[in-house]
Image (cartoon, helix red, strand yellow):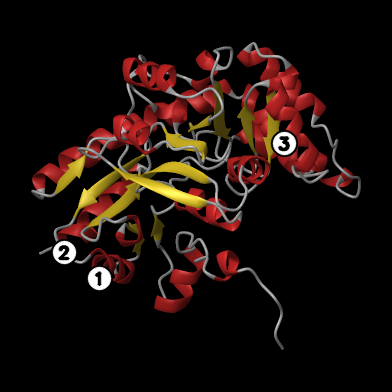
Amino acid sequence: MKISVPDHIRSLKPYVAGKPLEELEREYGITDAVKLASNENPLGPSPMAVKAVQDSLETMHRYPNGGSYELIGRLSNRLKLNRENIVLGNGSDDIIALLAQVLLQAGDEAILPRPSFLFYDIVIRGCGAIPVGVPLKSHSTDLDGMLARISSKTRLIFVNNPHNPTGSLISRESLETFIAALPTNIVLAIDEAYFEFVKDRGCPASIDYLQSDKIVVGLRTFSKAYGLAGLRVGYGLMPSFLADLLNRVRQPFNVNSLALAGAIAALEDENFLTETVALVHDELAFLYRGLDDLAVEYLESQANFCLIRVAKNADEVFEDLLKQGVIVRSMTSYGYPDCIRVNVGRRHENVRLLEALKVVLK
């Protein structure tokens, strides 16, 4: 059977997520595999979030609060923003897709770093718009290069800070110079999925620029530092007029009731957040020392992951590590054919990774 489908949809390549643990164990007969591929929280979910979800199970036959009143209220108080500046999504991916849906039409352009989060490219092409990739400069976002690519067709710019997959950071001075140079009709979306892990406290935050004369959006998530990747809840911070437009096109119940309960509780679990960030910083330092001992190159990171140059075919190293029971992410699809990305695990998981690398790279 044939149906009429636009070429810009047929040409899309689906997003490929990190390999699930259960799939590896089924394929290779391994029962103690370690997954370090998807930048997940090594401690698991917030205990307070787990309890809140359990307490909400008996009411899951009811629709969730469509306006996510309580969670938006908690975020509003914590961030000192008006409720009208916050939009919730089914993960921050949902906010990315809503921005594209609202802002982009066929033939429009959206600028993004190359490489970066693969979903930016998908949502841009999915609207019939044109992704304009600007190569990194010394593994960092080339803001000057982005400014040079702005045209009359540019509607949207994505940057991620810290950058994925390199873990590099845009400085406050560089970001403010960039924002000042932007035309007033272009939306700048700053993806801050790993913001909580940044060690450089001079790091700029999107929230600092929401009241500027330029249109700035911040994208954040409960998936990483709060350990709720499986519940899918994120949020966008933006001018109220833009939030109103996103709310017009989002699904009525785009964040489910269990996710709302978990996120509300996780937001209050400050001890868990502190423990998570401390573990990530300590274990990144441990990984660096181990990689130095193996004489393996890596990039120091401001996130919860590390880009490692294996100096071999990354896809082959990925497969060889699978046989050792360790799941990482090959960066071939990101334009780094000799690199893998690993997220920080607990000490025994990081030891397992280093031991496996020693075998695979020997």
Marks 3 and 1, the one that precedes in the sequence: 3
How packed mark 3 is, by other alpha carbons closer than 10 Å (few <14, some 14-19, many 20 or more), is many
Q: Residue furthest front?
A: 152
At x 81%, y 40%, the residue is 56
The image's mark for residue 3 is none
Mark 3 and mark 1: span between their CA atoms? 42 Å
**Total number of numbered labels?**
3
Q: Are marks 1 and 2 in contact (CB under 8 Å)?
A: yes
Residue that mark 2 sits on: 312
Residue that mark 3 sits on: 246
Residue 160 appears in the rendering: yes
The image's mark for residue 316 is 1
Identity of the amino acid at label 1?
A: Glu
User: Residue 173 at what x, y percent from top left?
Assistant: 33, 15
In the rendered view, would you say 144 is above or below 81? below
Between 182 and 350, the one lying in front of the other is 182
Between 241 and 259, the one lying in front of the other is 241
User: Residue 275 at what x, y percent from top left?
Assistant: 45, 27
Determine whether the residue tagged by mark 1 lies in a helix, strand or loop. Answer: helix
Between 113 and 193, the one lying in front of the other is 113
Determine whether the residue tagged by mark 3 lies in a helix, strand or loop. Answer: helix
